[in-house]
Amino acid sequence: MRRRIIMSMLAGVTLVAGALLGAAPAQSADVPAEFGADWHDPVTAAPPVTRPDTKSCDVTVAEAQFRDFTPYKGTYAPPRGCGDRWNKVVLRLDGKVKGRQFDRLGYLHIGGVEVFRTSTPQPSPDGIEWSVEKDVTRYSDTLREDQDVEMLIGNVVDDTYTGIIDVKVTLTFYAGEPAATINAGETAVKTPDRVLTLQDGTLTTPRNSERIVAEVYATGSGGGCEEYWYLTVPDVAPYSCKAGDGPYREVQVKVDGRLAGIAAPFPTVWTGGWSNPFLWYVIPGPRAFDIKPVEYDLTPFAGLLNDGRPHRIDVSVVGVPEGQAGWSTPVNVLVWQDAKSKHVTGKLTAHRAGDLDNSSAYTPGSEHRLDTEAGHRLTVAGYVDTSHGRVKTTVDRRLANTSVHRWTDGENTDALKGTWTDDETVTVDGRGPAKSTRTHRTYTMDGTTTLGAGDRLRTVLSLGDRAAVEETRGGRRTAWSRLDDSYAGDATYTANVPRDQRHAVGTTSERYRLYGTGGCHDRTLVTVQGTLTEDRAAC
Protein backbone atom coordinates (compact mmCIF):
# COMPACT_ATOMS: atom_id res chain seq x y z
CA MET A 1 0.00 0.00 0.00
CA ARG A 2 1.28 3.44 -0.85
CA ARG A 3 2.38 5.31 2.27
CA ARG A 4 0.88 8.54 1.00
CA ILE A 5 -2.47 6.81 1.50
CA ILE A 6 -1.73 5.49 5.00
CA MET A 7 -0.72 8.74 6.68
CA SER A 8 -3.49 10.25 8.79
CA MET A 9 -1.82 13.69 8.55
CA LEU A 10 -2.03 14.62 12.21
CA ALA A 11 -0.69 18.12 12.71
CA GLY A 12 1.98 18.87 14.76
CA VAL A 13 -10.44 5.18 31.35
CA THR A 14 -12.03 4.96 34.03
CA LEU A 15 -15.23 5.87 35.90
CA VAL A 16 -13.73 9.30 36.54
CA ALA A 17 -11.49 9.64 33.48
CA GLY A 18 -12.34 11.56 30.32
CA ALA A 19 -15.23 10.65 28.06
CA LEU A 20 -16.52 11.86 24.71
CA LEU A 21 -20.13 12.79 25.15
CA GLY A 22 -23.18 12.30 22.97
CA ALA A 23 -26.91 11.99 23.37
CA ALA A 24 -28.26 8.45 23.22
CA PRO A 25 -30.05 7.89 19.89
CA ALA A 26 -32.87 5.50 19.13
CA GLN A 27 -31.97 1.84 18.86
CA SER A 28 -32.47 1.80 15.09
CA ALA A 29 -32.33 4.33 12.27
CA ASP A 30 -32.64 4.50 8.50
CA VAL A 31 -29.28 3.49 7.08
CA PRO A 32 -28.14 5.00 3.76
CA ALA A 33 -26.60 2.77 1.09
CA GLU A 34 -23.29 4.61 1.51
CA PHE A 35 -21.78 7.57 3.36
CA GLY A 36 -23.33 10.88 2.36
CA ALA A 37 -22.39 14.50 3.04
CA ASP A 38 -23.23 14.27 6.73
CA TRP A 39 -23.15 11.72 9.56
CA HIS A 40 -23.82 11.38 13.27
CA ASP A 41 -21.76 13.57 15.59
CA PRO A 42 -18.83 11.77 17.26
CA VAL A 43 -19.67 9.65 20.30
CA THR A 44 -18.02 6.94 22.38
CA ALA A 45 -19.27 4.26 24.74
CA ALA A 46 -17.04 5.55 27.58
CA PRO A 47 -18.82 6.75 30.73
CA PRO A 48 -19.29 10.42 31.50
CA VAL A 49 -17.42 11.84 34.46
CA THR A 50 -19.32 11.23 37.69
CA ARG A 51 -20.26 14.40 39.53
CA PRO A 52 -20.96 14.98 43.24
CA ASP A 53 -24.20 16.49 44.43
CA THR A 54 -22.63 19.67 45.79
CA LYS A 55 -22.54 23.35 44.89
CA SER A 56 -20.72 23.98 41.59
CA CYS A 57 -19.07 26.93 39.85
CA ASP A 58 -18.10 27.28 36.18
CA VAL A 59 -15.07 29.03 34.68
CA THR A 60 -14.37 29.47 30.96
CA VAL A 61 -10.70 28.68 30.36
CA ALA A 62 -10.38 29.10 26.59
CA GLU A 63 -12.55 30.02 23.63
CA ALA A 64 -10.85 30.01 20.25
CA GLN A 65 -10.96 29.24 16.54
CA PHE A 66 -7.88 27.41 15.28
CA ARG A 67 -6.88 28.12 11.67
CA ASP A 68 -3.11 27.72 11.89
CA PHE A 69 -0.36 27.07 14.45
CA THR A 70 -0.89 30.22 16.50
CA PRO A 71 -1.63 29.31 20.14
CA TYR A 72 -4.55 30.79 22.00
CA LYS A 73 -3.26 32.71 25.01
CA GLY A 74 -5.39 33.93 27.88
CA THR A 75 -5.68 34.00 31.65
CA TYR A 76 -7.39 31.88 34.26
CA ALA A 77 -8.79 32.98 37.63
CA PRO A 78 -10.13 30.58 40.30
CA PRO A 79 -13.91 30.40 40.73
CA ARG A 80 -15.73 32.52 43.27
CA GLY A 81 -18.22 30.94 45.62
CA CYS A 82 -16.92 27.34 45.69
CA GLY A 83 -14.01 27.73 48.10
CA ASP A 84 -10.46 26.58 47.32
CA ARG A 85 -10.84 22.88 48.17
CA TRP A 86 -12.92 20.96 45.67
CA ASN A 87 -14.54 17.55 45.71
CA LYS A 88 -14.05 17.35 41.96
CA VAL A 89 -13.01 19.51 39.02
CA VAL A 90 -14.33 18.58 35.57
CA LEU A 91 -12.91 19.91 32.31
CA ARG A 92 -15.21 20.01 29.29
CA LEU A 93 -14.26 20.77 25.70
CA ASP A 94 -17.04 21.61 23.25
CA GLY A 95 -15.96 21.66 19.61
CA LYS A 96 -17.40 22.11 16.14
CA VAL A 97 -15.97 22.04 12.64
CA LYS A 98 -17.35 21.75 9.10
CA GLY A 99 -15.99 21.37 5.58
CA ARG A 100 -12.84 19.35 4.96
CA GLN A 101 -10.04 18.87 7.44
CA PHE A 102 -7.50 16.33 8.68
CA ASP A 103 -7.28 15.15 12.27
CA ARG A 104 -5.29 17.55 14.43
CA LEU A 105 -3.46 17.23 17.75
CA GLY A 106 -3.98 19.71 20.58
CA TYR A 107 -3.04 20.58 24.14
CA LEU A 108 -4.18 22.85 26.98
CA HIS A 109 -1.70 24.31 29.47
CA ILE A 110 -2.74 26.14 32.64
CA GLY A 111 0.16 27.73 34.51
CA GLY A 112 2.54 25.68 32.36
CA VAL A 113 0.88 22.41 33.47
CA GLU A 114 -0.49 20.21 30.70
CA VAL A 115 -4.00 19.42 31.91
CA PHE A 116 -5.43 18.06 28.65
CA ARG A 117 -4.14 16.54 25.41
CA THR A 118 -6.52 15.69 22.60
CA SER A 119 -7.00 15.11 18.90
CA THR A 120 -9.93 16.05 16.69
CA PRO A 121 -12.51 14.26 14.55
CA GLN A 122 -12.65 14.77 10.80
CA PRO A 123 -15.71 16.80 9.78
CA SER A 124 -18.51 16.27 7.31
CA PRO A 125 -19.21 18.96 4.71
CA ASP A 126 -22.32 19.89 6.70
CA GLY A 127 -20.42 20.08 10.00
CA ILE A 128 -20.14 18.15 13.26
CA GLU A 129 -20.09 18.94 16.96
CA TRP A 130 -18.48 16.97 19.77
CA SER A 131 -17.70 17.23 23.48
CA VAL A 132 -15.07 15.66 25.74
CA GLU A 133 -14.98 15.55 29.53
CA LYS A 134 -12.06 14.84 31.83
CA ASP A 135 -11.60 14.71 35.59
CA VAL A 136 -8.79 17.18 36.37
CA THR A 137 -9.11 17.22 40.17
CA ARG A 138 -5.48 16.15 40.47
CA TYR A 139 -4.43 19.58 39.19
CA SER A 140 -6.24 21.47 42.00
CA ASP A 141 -2.97 22.97 43.30
CA THR A 142 -2.46 24.73 39.96
CA LEU A 143 -6.09 25.85 39.78
CA ARG A 144 -6.07 27.66 43.15
CA GLU A 145 -4.15 30.64 41.74
CA ASP A 146 -4.39 33.01 38.77
CA GLN A 147 -2.56 31.44 35.83
CA ASP A 148 -1.63 32.00 32.22
CA VAL A 149 -3.45 29.78 29.72
CA GLU A 150 -2.12 28.43 26.45
CA MET A 151 -4.02 26.17 24.07
CA LEU A 152 -3.19 24.98 20.58
CA ILE A 153 -4.83 22.70 18.06
CA GLY A 154 -2.43 23.08 15.14
CA ASN A 155 -4.41 23.46 11.92
CA VAL A 156 -4.09 24.34 8.24
CA VAL A 157 -6.88 26.19 6.46
CA ASP A 158 -6.65 26.89 2.74
CA ASP A 159 -8.68 26.44 -0.44
CA THR A 160 -8.68 22.64 0.01
CA TYR A 161 -8.75 22.15 3.78
CA THR A 162 -11.53 24.48 4.88
CA GLY A 163 -12.33 23.25 8.39
CA ILE A 164 -11.85 25.87 11.10
CA ILE A 165 -11.77 24.19 14.53
CA ASP A 166 -13.99 26.12 16.94
CA VAL A 167 -13.64 25.12 20.62
CA LYS A 168 -14.66 26.24 24.08
CA VAL A 169 -13.13 24.80 27.26
CA THR A 170 -14.75 25.19 30.67
CA LEU A 171 -13.96 23.95 34.18
CA THR A 172 -16.71 23.05 36.65
CA PHE A 173 -15.70 23.08 40.33
CA TYR A 174 -17.64 21.10 42.93
CA ALA A 175 -17.28 22.37 46.49
CA GLY A 176 -16.02 20.04 49.22
CA GLU A 177 -13.01 17.88 50.02
CA PRO A 178 -12.01 15.29 47.40
CA ALA A 179 -12.38 11.61 48.22
CA ALA A 180 -9.73 9.01 47.43
CA THR A 181 -10.66 6.87 44.44
CA ILE A 182 -9.41 3.81 42.61
CA ASN A 183 -9.70 3.71 38.84
CA ALA A 184 -8.57 1.35 36.10
CA GLY A 185 -4.83 1.86 35.85
CA GLU A 186 -4.55 4.22 38.84
CA THR A 187 -3.78 3.93 42.54
CA ALA A 188 -6.26 5.03 45.21
CA VAL A 189 -4.78 8.33 46.40
CA LYS A 190 -5.82 11.78 47.55
CA THR A 191 -5.30 14.90 45.48
CA PRO A 192 -1.60 15.89 45.33
CA ASP A 193 -0.45 18.88 47.34
CA ARG A 194 1.73 20.26 44.54
CA VAL A 195 1.80 20.04 40.76
CA LEU A 196 5.22 20.86 39.34
CA THR A 197 6.69 21.25 35.87
CA LEU A 198 10.30 20.89 34.78
CA GLN A 199 12.48 24.00 34.63
CA ASP A 200 15.08 23.66 31.86
CA GLY A 201 14.81 19.89 32.21
CA THR A 202 15.27 19.90 35.99
CA LEU A 203 13.01 19.26 38.97
CA THR A 204 13.25 20.77 42.44
CA THR A 205 10.82 19.16 44.87
CA PRO A 206 9.66 20.51 48.25
CA ARG A 207 12.00 19.10 50.90
CA ASN A 208 9.11 17.44 52.73
CA SER A 209 7.86 15.41 49.74
CA GLU A 210 6.80 11.91 50.79
CA ARG A 211 5.29 10.69 47.50
CA ILE A 212 6.28 11.73 43.97
CA VAL A 213 4.61 10.69 40.71
CA ALA A 214 5.62 11.82 37.23
CA GLU A 215 3.12 11.83 34.39
CA VAL A 216 4.13 12.04 30.73
CA TYR A 217 1.67 12.85 27.93
CA ALA A 218 3.61 10.78 25.38
CA THR A 219 2.28 10.92 21.82
CA GLY A 220 3.79 9.81 18.53
CA SER A 221 2.49 12.25 15.95
CA GLY A 222 3.27 14.93 13.43
CA GLY A 223 2.54 13.29 10.09
CA GLY A 224 5.71 11.19 9.97
CA CYS A 225 6.30 7.51 10.59
CA GLU A 226 6.27 7.81 14.40
CA GLU A 227 2.57 8.58 14.10
CA TYR A 228 2.14 4.85 13.40
CA TRP A 229 5.33 3.61 15.07
CA TYR A 230 3.89 0.10 15.47
CA LEU A 231 4.20 -0.40 11.68
CA THR A 232 7.86 0.65 11.33
CA VAL A 233 10.48 -1.92 10.27
CA PRO A 234 14.29 -2.32 10.50
CA ASP A 235 16.39 -0.86 7.71
CA VAL A 236 16.87 -4.27 6.08
CA ALA A 237 13.17 -4.67 5.24
CA PRO A 238 11.64 -3.11 2.07
CA TYR A 239 8.95 -0.95 3.64
CA SER A 240 8.25 2.77 3.45
CA CYS A 241 8.60 3.47 7.19
CA LYS A 242 11.91 2.41 8.67
CA ALA A 243 13.31 2.52 12.20
CA GLY A 244 16.69 0.98 12.88
CA ASP A 245 15.53 -1.52 15.52
CA GLY A 246 11.95 -2.03 14.37
CA PRO A 247 8.60 -1.12 15.96
CA TYR A 248 9.27 -1.55 19.69
CA ARG A 249 8.76 1.67 21.66
CA GLU A 250 9.25 2.28 25.36
CA VAL A 251 8.88 5.57 27.23
CA GLN A 252 11.65 5.94 29.79
CA VAL A 253 12.20 8.43 32.62
CA LYS A 254 15.65 9.01 34.08
CA VAL A 255 16.62 10.87 37.26
CA ASP A 256 20.12 12.34 37.06
CA GLY A 257 20.91 9.91 34.25
CA ARG A 258 19.68 6.83 36.12
CA LEU A 259 16.73 4.82 34.77
CA ALA A 260 13.80 5.53 37.09
CA GLY A 261 10.73 4.38 35.14
CA ILE A 262 9.67 2.42 32.06
CA ALA A 263 6.29 2.19 30.33
CA ALA A 264 4.60 0.95 27.17
CA PRO A 265 2.98 3.75 25.14
CA PHE A 266 -0.62 3.19 24.09
CA PRO A 267 -0.89 2.55 20.31
CA THR A 268 -3.30 5.39 19.65
CA VAL A 269 -4.97 5.49 16.23
CA TRP A 270 -6.04 8.98 15.22
CA THR A 271 -9.17 9.69 13.18
CA GLY A 272 -7.41 9.42 9.81
CA GLY A 273 -5.42 6.35 10.77
CA TRP A 274 -5.05 3.07 8.88
CA SER A 275 -5.72 4.89 5.60
CA ASN A 276 -9.42 5.08 6.34
CA PRO A 277 -11.22 8.05 7.93
CA PHE A 278 -14.55 6.26 7.44
CA LEU A 279 -13.63 4.04 10.39
CA TRP A 280 -13.60 7.00 12.78
CA TYR A 281 -16.20 9.54 11.67
CA VAL A 282 -18.61 8.62 14.48
CA ILE A 283 -16.71 6.37 16.92
CA PRO A 284 -13.06 7.32 17.51
CA GLY A 285 -10.46 4.78 18.58
CA PRO A 286 -9.76 4.34 22.30
CA ARG A 287 -8.13 7.40 23.92
CA ALA A 288 -8.01 9.40 20.67
CA PHE A 289 -9.89 12.38 22.13
CA ASP A 290 -8.62 12.06 25.72
CA ILE A 291 -4.93 11.16 25.64
CA LYS A 292 -4.01 9.76 29.02
CA PRO A 293 -0.58 10.34 30.52
CA VAL A 294 1.82 7.53 31.34
CA GLU A 295 2.48 7.49 35.11
CA TYR A 296 5.68 6.66 37.00
CA ASP A 297 5.95 6.35 40.79
CA LEU A 298 9.26 8.05 41.64
CA THR A 299 8.83 7.82 45.42
CA PRO A 300 11.88 5.51 45.80
CA PHE A 301 13.94 8.52 44.61
CA ALA A 302 12.35 10.96 47.10
CA GLY A 303 15.31 10.87 49.49
CA LEU A 304 17.57 11.99 46.65
CA LEU A 305 15.14 14.54 45.21
CA ASN A 306 14.42 16.18 48.58
CA ASP A 307 17.89 17.69 49.02
CA GLY A 308 16.69 21.12 47.87
CA ARG A 309 18.74 21.10 44.67
CA PRO A 310 17.53 20.79 41.06
CA HIS A 311 17.78 17.29 39.57
CA ARG A 312 17.86 16.36 35.91
CA ILE A 313 14.73 14.61 34.59
CA ASP A 314 15.02 13.13 31.10
CA VAL A 315 12.25 11.47 29.09
CA SER A 316 13.13 9.46 26.01
CA VAL A 317 11.39 7.01 23.68
CA VAL A 318 13.35 3.83 23.00
CA GLY A 319 13.30 2.73 19.37
CA VAL A 320 13.16 6.14 17.70
CA PRO A 321 16.14 6.51 15.34
CA GLU A 322 18.71 8.97 16.64
CA GLY A 323 18.00 12.51 15.54
CA GLN A 324 14.50 11.69 14.32
CA ALA A 325 11.56 13.69 15.67
CA GLY A 326 7.98 12.55 16.03
CA TRP A 327 7.28 12.25 19.76
CA SER A 328 5.99 14.79 22.23
CA THR A 329 6.65 14.04 25.93
CA PRO A 330 5.54 16.91 28.23
CA VAL A 331 5.99 16.14 31.94
CA ASN A 332 4.05 17.04 35.10
CA VAL A 333 5.19 15.97 38.56
CA LEU A 334 2.63 15.36 41.31
CA VAL A 335 3.83 15.68 44.91
CA TRP A 336 2.30 14.71 48.23
CA GLN A 337 3.91 16.45 51.24
CA ASP A 338 4.36 15.57 54.90
CA ALA A 339 2.73 18.56 56.60
CA LYS A 340 4.42 17.79 59.93
CA SER A 341 7.97 17.64 58.57
CA LYS A 342 10.22 20.32 57.13
CA HIS A 343 12.58 17.79 55.55
CA VAL A 344 11.73 14.21 54.63
CA THR A 345 14.94 12.24 54.25
CA GLY A 346 15.37 8.84 52.65
CA LYS A 347 17.43 6.59 50.46
CA LEU A 348 17.24 4.54 47.25
CA THR A 349 17.85 0.98 48.47
CA ALA A 350 17.46 -1.14 45.32
CA HIS A 351 17.80 -0.58 41.58
CA ARG A 352 17.59 -3.56 39.25
CA ALA A 353 17.27 -2.86 35.53
CA GLY A 354 17.02 -5.93 33.33
CA ASP A 355 18.45 -6.09 29.84
CA LEU A 356 16.21 -4.65 27.16
CA ASP A 357 15.17 -7.53 24.89
CA ASN A 358 14.25 -6.34 21.42
CA SER A 359 14.27 -8.71 18.48
CA SER A 360 12.73 -8.14 15.04
CA ALA A 361 13.14 -10.96 12.51
CA TYR A 362 12.45 -10.12 8.84
CA THR A 363 11.36 -12.87 6.43
CA PRO A 364 11.28 -11.93 2.72
CA GLY A 365 8.81 -13.36 0.23
CA SER A 366 5.80 -12.52 -1.90
CA GLU A 367 4.35 -11.54 1.44
CA HIS A 368 6.99 -9.89 3.59
CA ARG A 369 6.87 -10.60 7.32
CA LEU A 370 8.36 -9.03 10.42
CA ASP A 371 8.11 -10.83 13.77
CA THR A 372 8.90 -8.71 16.82
CA GLU A 373 9.39 -9.78 20.41
CA ALA A 374 10.51 -7.32 23.05
CA GLY A 375 10.41 -6.72 26.77
CA HIS A 376 12.03 -5.00 29.71
CA ARG A 377 11.90 -5.06 33.52
CA LEU A 378 12.79 -2.50 36.16
CA THR A 379 12.59 -2.75 39.95
CA VAL A 380 13.38 0.20 42.23
CA ALA A 381 12.94 0.50 45.98
CA GLY A 382 13.60 3.14 48.60
CA TYR A 383 12.38 4.59 51.88
CA VAL A 384 11.46 7.96 53.36
CA ASP A 385 11.53 8.86 57.04
CA THR A 386 8.33 10.79 57.69
CA SER A 387 6.58 12.22 60.75
CA HIS A 388 4.55 9.01 60.86
CA GLY A 389 7.52 6.68 60.59
CA ARG A 390 9.65 5.05 57.91
CA VAL A 391 7.79 4.19 54.70
CA LYS A 392 9.29 1.83 52.14
CA THR A 393 8.15 1.90 48.51
CA THR A 394 8.95 -0.75 45.91
CA VAL A 395 8.00 -0.35 42.25
CA ASP A 396 8.26 -3.34 39.91
CA ARG A 397 7.38 -2.92 36.23
CA ARG A 398 7.49 -5.44 33.40
CA LEU A 399 6.88 -4.65 29.73
CA ALA A 400 6.34 -7.05 26.82
CA ASN A 401 5.46 -6.69 23.15
CA THR A 402 4.82 -9.22 20.39
CA SER A 403 3.71 -8.34 16.88
CA VAL A 404 3.51 -9.80 13.39
CA HIS A 405 3.60 -7.35 10.47
CA ARG A 406 2.78 -8.66 6.97
CA TRP A 407 2.81 -6.71 3.69
CA THR A 408 3.12 -7.19 -0.05
CA ASP A 409 5.29 -5.39 -2.60
CA GLY A 410 3.86 -1.92 -3.12
CA GLU A 411 2.15 -2.27 0.28
CA ASN A 412 -1.21 -2.88 -1.38
CA THR A 413 -1.82 -5.28 1.47
CA ASP A 414 -0.59 -4.21 4.90
CA ALA A 415 -1.46 -6.05 8.12
CA LEU A 416 -0.44 -6.00 11.77
CA LYS A 417 -1.35 -8.08 14.79
CA GLY A 418 0.22 -6.83 18.01
CA THR A 419 -0.07 -7.06 21.79
CA TRP A 420 1.55 -4.83 24.41
CA THR A 421 1.51 -5.55 28.15
CA ASP A 422 2.57 -3.25 30.98
CA ASP A 423 2.47 -4.89 34.41
CA GLU A 424 3.20 -2.80 37.48
CA THR A 425 3.19 -3.51 41.22
CA VAL A 426 3.68 -0.72 43.76
CA THR A 427 4.10 -1.85 47.36
CA VAL A 428 4.07 0.64 50.24
CA ASP A 429 5.18 -0.65 53.63
CA GLY A 430 4.94 1.68 56.58
CA ARG A 431 2.72 1.99 59.59
CA GLY A 432 0.22 -0.90 59.54
CA PRO A 433 -0.07 -3.73 57.01
CA ALA A 434 1.74 -3.31 53.67
CA LYS A 435 -0.37 -2.01 50.81
CA SER A 436 0.10 -3.21 47.22
CA THR A 437 -1.46 -1.98 44.00
CA ARG A 438 -1.14 -4.32 41.03
CA THR A 439 -2.01 -3.04 37.55
CA HIS A 440 -2.06 -5.25 34.47
CA ARG A 441 -2.46 -3.26 31.24
CA THR A 442 -2.99 -4.92 27.84
CA TYR A 443 -3.23 -3.12 24.50
CA THR A 444 -4.14 -4.97 21.29
CA MET A 445 -4.29 -4.17 17.58
CA ASP A 446 -5.33 -6.48 14.73
CA GLY A 447 -5.86 -4.93 11.32
CA THR A 448 -5.48 -5.30 7.58
CA THR A 449 -5.68 -2.68 4.83
CA THR A 450 -5.99 -3.81 1.19
CA LEU A 451 -5.99 -1.72 -1.99
CA GLY A 452 -7.84 -3.83 -4.56
CA ALA A 453 -9.41 -3.62 -8.00
CA GLY A 454 -10.75 -0.22 -8.96
CA ASP A 455 -8.67 1.35 -6.19
CA ARG A 456 -11.17 0.10 -3.62
CA LEU A 457 -9.44 0.43 -0.27
CA ARG A 458 -10.72 -1.72 2.59
CA THR A 459 -9.59 -1.62 6.23
CA VAL A 460 -10.65 -4.17 8.84
CA LEU A 461 -9.38 -3.30 12.31
CA SER A 462 -9.92 -4.14 15.97
CA LEU A 463 -8.37 -2.34 18.97
CA GLY A 464 -8.36 -3.14 22.67
CA ASP A 465 -7.56 -1.10 25.77
CA ARG A 466 -7.71 -3.25 28.90
CA ALA A 467 -6.61 -2.81 32.51
CA ALA A 468 -7.05 -4.83 35.68
CA VAL A 469 -6.28 -3.15 38.99
CA GLU A 470 -6.22 -4.80 42.40
CA GLU A 471 -5.38 -3.17 45.69
CA THR A 472 -4.52 -5.24 48.76
CA ARG A 473 -3.61 -4.44 52.34
CA GLY A 474 -1.93 -7.07 54.44
CA GLY A 475 -2.64 -9.57 51.66
CA ARG A 476 -6.41 -8.94 51.63
CA ARG A 477 -8.10 -7.30 48.66
CA THR A 478 -9.58 -3.90 49.47
CA ALA A 479 -10.46 -2.54 46.01
CA TRP A 480 -10.42 -3.64 42.37
CA SER A 481 -11.51 -2.65 38.87
CA ARG A 482 -11.60 -4.11 35.36
CA LEU A 483 -11.59 -2.07 32.15
CA ASP A 484 -12.24 -3.48 28.67
CA ASP A 485 -12.64 -0.93 25.88
CA SER A 486 -12.96 -2.78 22.55
CA TYR A 487 -13.33 -1.20 19.09
CA ALA A 488 -14.00 -2.95 15.76
CA GLY A 489 -14.39 -1.46 12.28
CA ASP A 490 -14.69 -2.48 8.61
CA ALA A 491 -14.81 0.28 5.98
CA THR A 492 -14.26 0.48 2.21
CA TYR A 493 -14.02 3.40 -0.20
CA THR A 494 -12.57 4.31 -3.60
CA ALA A 495 -9.16 5.92 -3.15
CA ASN A 496 -7.52 8.61 -5.28
CA VAL A 497 -10.80 10.20 -6.40
CA PRO A 498 -12.65 13.37 -5.33
CA ARG A 499 -14.51 13.11 -2.06
CA ASP A 500 -17.96 12.86 -3.64
CA GLN A 501 -16.88 9.84 -5.72
CA ARG A 502 -15.59 7.63 -2.89
CA HIS A 503 -18.82 5.54 -2.52
CA ALA A 504 -17.80 4.63 1.03
CA VAL A 505 -19.44 2.04 3.25
CA GLY A 506 -18.50 1.03 6.77
CA THR A 507 -19.58 -0.56 10.02
CA THR A 508 -17.98 0.30 13.36
CA SER A 509 -18.68 -0.68 16.96
CA GLU A 510 -17.40 -0.09 20.47
CA ARG A 511 -18.11 -1.85 23.74
CA TYR A 512 -16.82 -0.16 26.88
CA ARG A 513 -16.98 -2.21 30.08
CA LEU A 514 -15.77 -0.94 33.45
CA TYR A 515 -16.70 -2.58 36.72
CA GLY A 516 -15.38 -3.17 40.22
CA THR A 517 -15.70 -1.69 43.68
CA GLY A 518 -16.45 1.71 42.07
CA GLY A 519 -19.54 0.45 40.24
CA CYS A 520 -20.42 -0.80 36.77
CA HIS A 521 -20.59 0.68 33.28
CA ASP A 522 -21.29 -1.39 30.14
CA ARG A 523 -22.28 0.36 26.91
CA THR A 524 -22.23 -0.77 23.28
CA LEU A 525 -22.47 1.43 20.18
CA VAL A 526 -22.84 0.35 16.53
CA THR A 527 -22.73 2.52 13.39
CA VAL A 528 -23.44 1.77 9.73
CA GLN A 529 -22.55 4.31 7.02
CA GLY A 530 -22.19 7.01 9.67
CA THR A 531 -25.62 6.31 11.19
CA LEU A 532 -25.79 5.26 14.83
CA THR A 533 -27.92 2.12 14.76
CA GLU A 534 -27.45 0.76 18.26
CA ASP A 535 -26.85 2.24 21.71
CA ARG A 536 -27.22 -0.40 24.41
CA ALA A 537 -26.44 -0.33 28.13
CA ALA A 538 -26.03 -3.58 30.07
CA CYS A 539 -25.45 -2.55 33.72
Image (cartoon, rainbow, N blue to C red):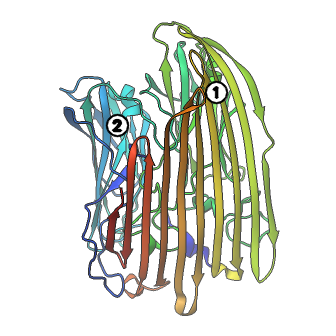
For the point 79% across and 49% down, which residue is it?
357
Kindly tell me whether residue 59 is visible in this rendering: yes
Would you say 444 lies left or right of 96 here?
A: right
Instruction: Give the amino acid at mark 1.
Output: Arg
For the point 65% across and 23% down, which residue is it?
301
* Residue pointed to by mark 1: 312
Q: Position of residue 167 (x, y in %)?
A: 29, 53
Q: Eyeballing the image, is 242 above or below 507?
A: above
Q: Nearer the viewer, residue 405 or 525?
A: 525
Q: CA distance from mark 2 to mark 1?
A: 26 Å
Would you say 293 lies left or right of 142 here?
A: right
Q: Position of residue 47 (x, y in %)?
A: 36, 52
Q: Mark 2–mark 1 contact, CB under 8 Å?
A: no
For the point 42% across and 77% down, which residue is it?
507
Q: Quadrant of the C terminus?
A: bottom left
Kindly tell me whether residue 111 is visible in this rendering: no
Q: Eyeballing the image, is 312 above or below 338?
A: below
Q: Nearer the viewer, residue 511 or 289?
A: 511
Q: Residues within 10 Å of mark 2 (few under 14, many from 20)?
A: some
Q: Position of residue 61 (x, y in %)?
A: 28, 40
* Residue pointed to by mark 2: 149
